Image (cartoon, grey):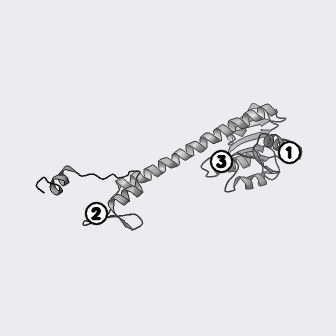
Amino acid sequence: MKILIAEDDYTSRLMLQVILEKWKYKVETAENGTEAWDLLQHKEPPQIAILDWEMPEMDGLEVCQRARALELDTPIYIIMLTGRNTTDDIVYGLDAGADDYITKPFDENELRARVRVAERMVTIQHSLSSTVEELRRALDHVDTLQGILPICMHCHGIRSDDEAWYKLEKYIENNTMAKFSHSICPDCLSKHYSEED
């Protein structure tokens, strides 16, 4: 799992990076809010971001608010890192879109616990996103089968959305999970295999 550390203080940033890499996380770092924002807009952004509240160019709250506006299947889990520890500050940070916070100086055990919570939440969100996508595909199939299908009155071929014509069996196999097994209905059995033949 990839974690972004956005912290303008070199010593704090390096300490966080060393600790997280020791725990086998892939780490990206940013020295200011603008760098952090750039990294969060990548095609495959980090799943977790630890943002310092006070940074040059763009503070952690603004980065957090911009990240919340991104249209992602799995939202980035944001932990605000701050020297502020009043209830009002914490509430303000959470209202800005942060999922959690850690106060400076941070305790390594608390950091580990909060990052593990973040990892669990990201995993759950990813699983939910995958399930929603599967449901969307299933509904698309239902819509296809419930809609009006152009069918040839002679050979019973079906025209698909891409304007190609398919045999009925092939169309159903391509657009559903159904598979065919061949049999004979009672009418055809008596018509084609009568005892008189």
Sequence-wise, the earlier of marks 3 and 2 is 3
Task: Give neighbour class at mark 2: few <14, some 14-19, many 20+ (Cα, 10 Å).
Answer: some
In percent of width and height, residue 26 lies at 75, 47
Q: Is residue 88 visible?
A: no
Sequence-wise, the earlier of marks 1 and 3 is 1
Sequence-wise, the earlier of marks 2 and 1 is 1
Helix, strand or loop at label 1? It is: helix
Task: Give neighbour class at mark 3: few <14, some 14-19, many 20+ (Cα, 10 Å).
Answer: some
Amino acid carrying mark 3 in the image: Arg
In percent of width and height, residue 81 lies at 78, 40
Q: Is residue 155 visible?
A: yes
* Distance CA(mark 2)–CA(mark 1): 69 Å
Return the residue nearer the eye: 194 or 29.
194
**Res. 23 image quadrant:** top right
Return the residue nearer the eye: 95 or 43.
43
Report the number of discs.
Answer: 3
